Amino acid sequence: MTEDIKKAILAYAEGSNKTKFYFKDMEKAVVKTIPEAKMRDVKKAATALVNEGILIYFSTGSSTMYGLKGRGMTEDPTEGTE
Amino acid sequence: MAFEPVREMKKLNYDEMRIYSEAELKNYTEEELKSFKCKYEIPDLDELEKGPWPSFVSDTKQEALRRRKLSDDQMLIGRDVCEDMLGQLQTSFDEGETHWKHGGIVGVFGYGGGVIGRYSDLAEKYPSIAMFHTVRVNQPASKFYSTDFLKTICDMWEYRGSGMMNLHGSTGDLVLLGTTTEQLEPIFYELGHVLDTDIGGSGSNLRTPACCIGKARCEFACYDTQDLCYDLTQYYQDELHRPAFPYKFKFKFDGCPNGCVASIARSDMSFIGTWRDDIRIDQDAVKAYIAGDIVPNAGAHGKRDWGKFDINKEVISLCPTKCMSMEGDQLVIDNSECVRCMHCINTMPRALKPGLDTGITILLGAKAPILDGAQMATLMVPFMKAEAPYDNIKAFVERVWEFWMEEGKNRERLGELMQRVTLPKFIETIGLPPAPQMVKAPRANPYIFWKEEDVKGGWNRDINDYRSRHKR
Ligand code: HEM
Ligand code: HEM
Ligand code: SF4
Ligand code: SF4
């Protein structure tokens, strides 16, 4: 299950034209391919991907988004303004 | 089972941990401080020092002076960080524009919050604040620190950060202001492994929970605020550190309706201690207050002469529901009308005490302005027991989260969601029965909202069949 969700997350992240996305949008995309995936399962899978260094968090300080490491989100902060 | 730490917290000994000697910490004289001039002209900030309040500008100058006099190997980030911060602030005053840009992927491994990336867009002019990240540190319950802890964290921050900190943010955290990306992991290590302390929440996650002083010092506490705060902090570690909420979410814990942490205004989920039974009355003490043998308000307003204590004027007629009276020399309270405002208890604490059947009231949805302006919390659960391991409370928390995470839009606070779906729909979805305590006053209009299942035949009826029986 977790592996499938991870694949769905990556498919969404790679297919999206956005470089960073909210958890909710990511979750919606996963549920489209895996309808039985629960919100907590998606979160666990996303955390696992962060720990594996594939996904990264992006935080403004007040809200947090996810992104693919090395894609659009660099250490350059000018990229990160809202 | 309530949360049990795997081991006792370490006892810190500052003398073993200290980085700076006493002389290094006081490395300037009062005269030097008085004549201190920032390396930039900061006229508007100088002006800020002139008011009656303590000023962050004075504090920052003091720190800037110390940093000027420390040696190079005694700090790991820019020496001029304080002065550059002041200089940039003056520039912003001049131009009416901020020069901070934020965002980015700064953080510590495995955590999605707690560190807030900040950068200056005037890095050439103010190089020491090119990176100026904030670290939130999870404060202990009720902010009970040992001096050894505070001194140790101050040394650590002088060494690895700007030396500027804020005790405390309105969320509750101890806030470390201004460091570089390179220092984040070492700081995280020092906090976790040396100071036995975690970083707090930021971003779309559970923010660092905070509580009033509660049973540690306060006789009014109707439940153990520190224990509940600590227990939920530990239980919801994942929610605190790995953001997956639509937006921020705050818990705050007040031991009684006096609300010393103002949970009703400052948290998405506010816990306020209360009681179900009657206010306890010591009639002898009531007489002693009336006779002037005990000072009212525990002497809190005693610096001025308010005249002789008048129980009618100061207590009975101020009761918001007028549920108190004197019958002869006995004080009588109609407890079914009491709204637990605390006024009488605060005024005569030796005569009146909260009841003994205590628990919590839970309110939801307070927030500070962004979309529709500030909003106070709405009462949802009039009474619930609050005893370890708090399974009833956790079950409620999770029902609310589930709904918010399901239905909430990105960056929509719980209070905004409640308004959007309407209160009747909200309480139904999270399975709360409507209760009189949720209503401020009975409604004055006659509309009644029926549900389809309450109506015989539902919404669909055959109008012709009806007309066959009822002429127009
Ligand atoms: C007329 C003067 C001032 C007024 C009316 C005022 C009002 C307030 C209010 C209403 C809050 C929010 C309290 C809460 O969250 O419960 C606050 C927070 C705060 N104030 Fe002031 N304040 C004043 C001056 C100052 C000054 C001079 C300083 C510092 C030099 C200061 C530092 C702070 C800080 C650090 C916070 C906490 C900010 C946070 O945690 O978000 N205030 N102030
Ligand atoms: C010396 C400078 C600063 C001081 C004293 C300061 C102080 C604070 C405090 C006390 C809080 C509240 C923390 C809490 O609720 O626990 C806060 C929050 C915040 N600060 Fe600062 N801050 C400083 C610099 C900055 C800078 C430079 C930025 C942006 C470029 C910034 C952006 C924010 C944001 C966005 C929040 C709110 C985050 C949230 O809870 O949603 N701060 N700051
Ligand atoms: S909120 Fe009530 S219990 Fe908590 S410290 Fe204040 S008066 Fe005491
Ligand atoms: S707590 Fe407030 S409402 Fe209750 S009896 Fe005292 S003054 Fe009246």
Image (cartoon, grey):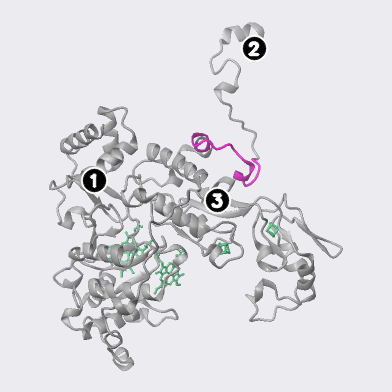
Sequence-earlier tag: 2 or 3: 3
Pointer 2 local density, CA inside 10 Å: few below 14, some 14–19, many at least 20: few
Residue B126 seen in the current view: no
- Which marked residue is nearer to the observer: mark 1 or mark 3? 3
Indicate which quadrant contains ligand 4. Answer: bottom right
Q: Name the residue that disc number 1 marks.
A: A66
Which secondary structure dominates the residues rendered in magenta? loop
| Camera-nearest residue between B267 and B3 | B3
Q: Specify whether disc 1 shares its chain with disc 2.
A: no
Give coordinates of residue B457: x percent, y percent.
58, 15
- Which marked residue is nearer to the observer: mark 2 or mark 3? 3
Pointer 1 local density, CA inside 10 Å: few below 14, some 14–19, many at least 20: many
Q: Name the residue that disc number 3 marks.
A: B387
Q: Specify whether disc 2 shares its chain with disc 3.
A: yes
Q: Which mark is residue B472?
A: 2
Q: Specify whether disc 1 shares its chain with disc 3.
A: no
Task: Report if the CB atoms under discs 1 and 2 are less than 8 Å apart.
Answer: no
Q: Which residues are magenta?
A: B426-443
Question: Which residue is drawn at the image coordinates 25% and 52% (left, top)?
Answer: B110
Question: Which residue is drawn at the image coordinates 31% and 31% (left, top)?
Answer: A37
| Camera-nearest residue between B167 and B455 | B167
Give coordinates of residue A55: x percent, y percent.
19, 45
SS of the residue under disc 1? strand
Residue B109: quarter of image: bottom left
| Camera-nearest residue between B34 and B23 | B23
Ligand 2 has an atom within 8 Å of the beta carbon of the residue at disc 1: no
Q: Mark 2: which amino acid?
A: Arg
The subunit letter for the residue under badge 3 reads B
SS of the residue under disc 2? loop
